[in-house]
Amino acid sequence: MKKSIYIMALGAFGIITTEFGVIGILPALVKEFHISIDTAGWLLSGFALTVALAGPFTNMLTAKMNRKTIMCLVLGIFVISNLLSAVAPNFTVLMIARILPAFLHPVFWAVSMTAASKQAGPKDAPKAIAIVMAGLSVATVLGVPLTTYMADLFNWRASFVLSAFINLLAFAALALFVPTMPADDEQASTKSQVKILGSAQLWVRLLTSTIVLAGMFATYGYLAEYLDKVSHMNGVQISIMLLVFGGTGIVGNWLTGIALSKNIPVTSRLFLLALVIMHLLAYKFGGLFIPMVTILSVWGFIHTGGFLVANLHVIDGIQGKALDFVNSLLPSFFNAGITVGSLLGGFVIAHYGIHEVIWMTVPLLLLALGLSFITISEKQEARKELTNEINEPEPVQAVVCE
């Protein structure tokens, strides 16, 4: 059981490294293809947008497939995508190669989370999910500096080769060491799954988490460019700073998980406030090398917990089949946030300059903070449902006289 879960975590690491690995090489791609930074940003936002739009449909279409087979299929496509990206002769081909695997990205996420919880059993399900999520968290903090370092050591094409190798390793491990996982014949009916979408509180949480991701990636999506143009760091220094950002983020993600286990609402709000402060400090001292090194270290420590905060904020209190259904929706909403944030960040950079991108992030994070205080109690929702039932006309009953 543990072996299978760790292998799925490796798969998550490979997939997320593919998604976010371009962040560190955007400046190199701008020079290679003679495009603007906001155009290059579509490699991130276009991928995320595809995930957001395709997620609900691809999960439904693959619901009856063997769980191991579909995960192997996803990882295989990611290997091919990265290899195609590595030999792309122009930006158009690179963009197409990036978009293709994005259609199946949410399938791996939903399947691995559900499969891990089922293999572990009800008692150990939270630990199993945390292990798979660790693959995502580590990828967000180490995937970017690894691909950036490969691009600086060789060239930008080498970063895609590295991502292909990681996904190939996960594919081989999954194919060889994970037992077959037939689809659950006792799937919850569509009606019972969709019923939870009637929860107003769930929609508030989904909106809040989407805005959190948008705020995070409005700036983080262009962090390498920010360090290049504002902090005047060279390629080696940027790679090292992204590694520091990721290294402190691993510790921060672990501590955020502990804090969330004690109190999700308070931890989420403190996270948002701390992230706002770090962005303001980066704006104020971004042009100074030593202060920026310190700021990046603390920023990474805070930033990495964002996915965990957003995830637990949404699923807090949700159980059973409804949890599986909501888990399948999360990639769409999270990547919608990444798409919006990347596009808004690119717009600010194109019109006002890279330094001003901070002022797109701060309002989004403050908006999410405000939304986190909105609570719709179950009593209110039950009362609304009861009112709707009362207002429905009584069915006409036929009276038969003998």
Image: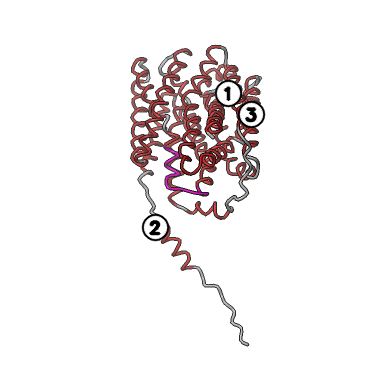
Q: Is residue 233 visible?
A: yes
Kind of residue at disc 2: Gln
* 339 vs 398, nearest the viewer: 398
Q: Is residue 330 magenta?
A: no
The mark tally for this picture is 3
Residue 360 appears at what percent x and percent y? 42, 32
Which one is in front in this view, the residue at disc 1 or the one at disc 3?
A: 3
Q: Is residue 312 magenta?
A: yes
Q: Is residue 347 visible?
A: no
Query: Residue 402's quadrant in the figure?
Result: bottom right
User: Can you identify the residue that label 1 sits on?
Assistant: 166
Query: Which of pointers 3 and 2 lies earlier in the amino acid sequence?
Result: 3
Badge 2: residue crowd in 10 Å (few <14, some 14–19, many ≥20): few
User: Can you identify the residue that label 2 sits on?
Assistant: 380
Spatial separation of the CA atoms under disc 1 and disc 3: 16 Å
Residue 352 appears left or right of 281: right
Query: Residue 32's quadrant in the figure?
Result: top right
Q: Is residue 292 above or below residue 321?
A: above
Query: Which of pointers 2 and 1 lies earlier in the amino acid sequence?
Result: 1
Q: Is residue 52 above or below residue 386?
A: above
